[in-house]
Amino acid sequence: MWRITLTSLAMALVVGLGLALAPLAPAQQAPPPTWKQGQPSSMADSTLAPIAQPPAPAAPGEIPVGKIKVPAGFKVSLWASGINNARMMTWGEKGTLFVSSRVAGNVYAVIDSGGQRTVKTIAKGLNLPNGVAFKDGTLYIAEVSRITKMVGIEGKLDSPPALEVVYDILPRDLPHGWKYLAFGPDGKLYFNIGAPCNICIPPDTHANISRVNPDGTGFEYFARGVRNSVGFDWHPVTKELYFATHGRDWLGDDVPSDRLDVAPMKGLHFGFPYCHQGDILDPEFGKGHACGEFAAPLLKTGAHVAGNGVQFYTGSMFPAEYKNRIFLAQRGSWNRSQKVGFRVMMVTLRPGDVPKYEVFAEGWLQGQDIWGRPVYTQEMKDGSLLVSDDYAGAIYRIAYQP
């Protein structure tokens, strides 16, 4: 036994010394970040990269609201601040504004009491909870792979109820995994499932707009070939679905354009990844296809502008010509040498003609410097318009004062 032990020790020393003297294996390189996927080798040294989110929301005195320009007769004010990564907004039945945070992973409730706004965190630690919708006393929240609800939340803001699962078998991919969430005219919950890439042939489960019943039953795909849409609304009269679509990156400063699309029926395919902006075949995946196979965009909104919020105006405060116009909040570019977007556009639909497309609010981009990123809009009961800014962590109110 002693001899066997000595032999074993000797062998262990030899093996140990051999390992110590052996040349070290080359260190494995970390995979590139997902936003670099699809980058051509000719742009390997590009300094373009997504704009980093500030570590905390800006203080009210640091928010230069006066730089926001709007048409004559309109006025912009700071309505709420200190809301980390303020994103999508939805109203409760008792006047509570619920606000999501994609990056912070929170959902907030904003209470307006006599002109003073109080912000409460009602859910935290969620997985990119971008989408919020409210109906029949219940708040619905969309994370990457599930939809949950908080029943009776407006009466329990200081002691929020537990999240109840509505639907929890959605894909778990993080790229373009955050969701918009809204109730359609049919009473169903609509949401996007983005492509898990910049450019690829996605699984059949991705690159679409889908819907379920409020109880989680009846899942179905409504539109396909949609790379990433995190904003949509229904025409107040025709009830047709209008949505913004983000185009792919790394094809250049000016192509492909982002889109505003309309889906008058279920089952249309909008081209991703084969055709971009309705008339440019993808250099790799477009082979063997024609853009005529797919639904064309209603409007090309500009390359890399990142349209998010889509909302038809139905209020009565703004001039009559604003009725049924679309407000399109553009969070702004990163994959472009000269920044573009960072504004709220408006789209006037014109039957038989190309929609009119013009600026409504701008000023978050000063030269090539940004201080805010408008991301969603929400109409108030009095007809004024709220605009969320996920970069400054603020919400602005735009009112009309003739």
Image (tube, helix red, strand yellow):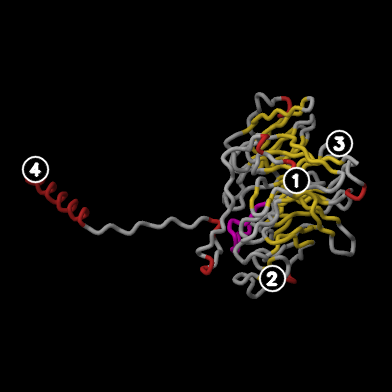
- The residues tagged by marks 1 and 4 sit, at their Cα atoms, a distance apart of 85 Å
Look at the numbered discs 1 and 2 and tell me whether their residues touch, using CB distance below 8 Å: no
Q: Secondary structure at mark 3?
A: loop
Residue 287 at x, y = what percent? 63, 74
- Which residue is found at the position 14% from the left and 51% from the top? 11
Q: Is residue 270 magenta?
A: no
According to the image, label 4 marks what residue? 1
Q: Amino acid at mark 4?
A: Met
Relative to 191, say whether 43 is above or below. Answer: below
Give the farthest residue toward the right.
Answer: 320
Marks 3 and 2: which is nearer the front?
3
Viewed as shown, does residue 29 lie left or right of 37?
left
- Which residue is found at the position 64% from the left and 64% from the top? 253
Q: Residues within 10 Å of mark 3 (few under 14, many from 20)?
A: few
According to the image, label 3 marks what residue? 382
Q: Amino acid at mark 2?
A: Ile
Q: Secondary structure at mark 2?
A: strand
Q: What mark, if any, has residue 68 been given in the picture?
A: 1
Sequence-first disc among 3 and 2: 2
- The N terminus appears in which quarter of the rendering? top left
Q: Is residue 167 visible?
A: no
According to the image, label 2 marks what residue? 280
- Which residue is found at the position 77% from the left and 33% from the top? 92
Magenta span main SS: loop
- Which span is picked out in magenta? 192-205
- The residues tagged by marks 3 and 2 sit, at their Cα atoms, a distance apart of 43 Å
Sequence-first disc among 1 and 4: 4
